Image: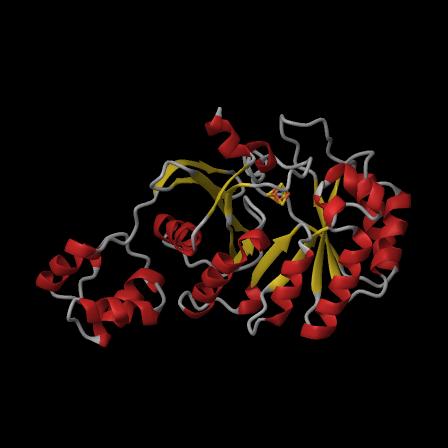
Amino acid sequence: MSLDELTDFTDSIQESKYRAKQIHNWIYLKSVSSIEQMTDISKATREKISEVAQISNVKIKNKQVSSDGTIKYLLEYTDGNCAETVLMRFDNRANLTACVSSQVGCACNCKFCATAKLGFIRNLTPYEIIEQVLTIQRDTGLKVTNIVFMGQGEPLLNLDNVLKAIEIFNKDFVIGIRRITVSTCGIIPQINKLAEIDFQPTLAISLHAPEHELRKELMPIENKYPLDELMQTLKSYVSDTGRRITIEYTLIKGFNDTVDCAKKLSKLLISLKANINLIIYNPNDKDNFEKPSKDSIQKFKYILEQSGKKVTIRLERGSDIDAACGQLSNKFAK
Ligand code: SF4
């Protein structure tokens, strides 16, 4: 609930607006897991609230901790469906990034993705999305500073719920809108909708190939929303919003990590205001793709940089646990 919704709630039980602020503070800033812990509220009032409300009804079904500090949770919702969320820490930064899921499973069927193997099951509600970050905060005692919608599901196919969750992350968790990233495989009508709202998160596009035929092999969505239309949409998005886009490109050995692909990608992106984030493919046991060599990664990066783009290589996180999106759910789905 937002503060306004909590105020409606306290009105409904004949409690003051101030009570709503106290509850809001305990949930979002102090990350308590029970109403009992709200010790600046009288015992009688806590009992009254507990009769009609609870903070969370989501269970941690599984938790894996990597030697690099990454923590992956599999959360179970009340209907028995599960979704993953990951806390990533980077040694040299104070940032704590939560990678959240927006759907149970996914319909987009990207060939390199473990979540795709589950198929689409259902959308997550705003509460179920927010609960992922609250779970991390409660479990670790830490405050999440950045959110990326890069977990399970295609966020733009659950846009209304994702936007409601983003509003709460921004206003109630006090996470700056530029610290919230939504990653999409390229749902063109929804990108256009996103361009029209008042509070744009950072938009990241899962591109993964520099041309139509190659992208089609990897991402069936390319049949519906082809690359040339996607590029036009992204250019309009940038001119309408003034925001820089992040292009995500997963390097897969022998498939899209060649010098030819790097040159084609440079050309494709030359007039787009975008940074490029190279992701090293994280192998799973469901496909035959392999990790690229260090040499091909560096060559690829160098060629892109020659075109004047800022290029980063995403730090590998959680390689000793099932940290790639969908790996943990698949294990439990078995
Ligand atoms: S990569 Fe994202 S959009 Fe593609 S199948 Fe996986 S979860 Fe869905």
Q: Is residue 55 above or below residue 322?
A: below
Pick out the residue farthest to the left. 44
Q: Nearer the viewer, residue 246 or 235?
A: 235
Q: What's the residue at 69%, 54% (across, down)?
A: 205
214 left or right, relative to 40: right
Asked which colour scheme the image uses, the reply is secondary structure
Q: How many marks?
A: 0
259 left or right, relative to 198: right
251 left or right, relative to 200: right
Q: Is residue 87 above or below residue 30?
A: above
Query: x, y percentage for residue 70?
Result: 51, 44
Q: Is residue 110 above or below residue 307?
A: above
Pick out the residue farthest to the top. 334
- Residue 91 visible within the image: no
Query: x, y percentage for residue 308?
Result: 84, 63
Q: What's the residue at 27%, 71% (across, down)?
A: 7
Quadrant occupied by the N terminus: bottom left
Query: x, y percentage for residue 5?
Result: 32, 68
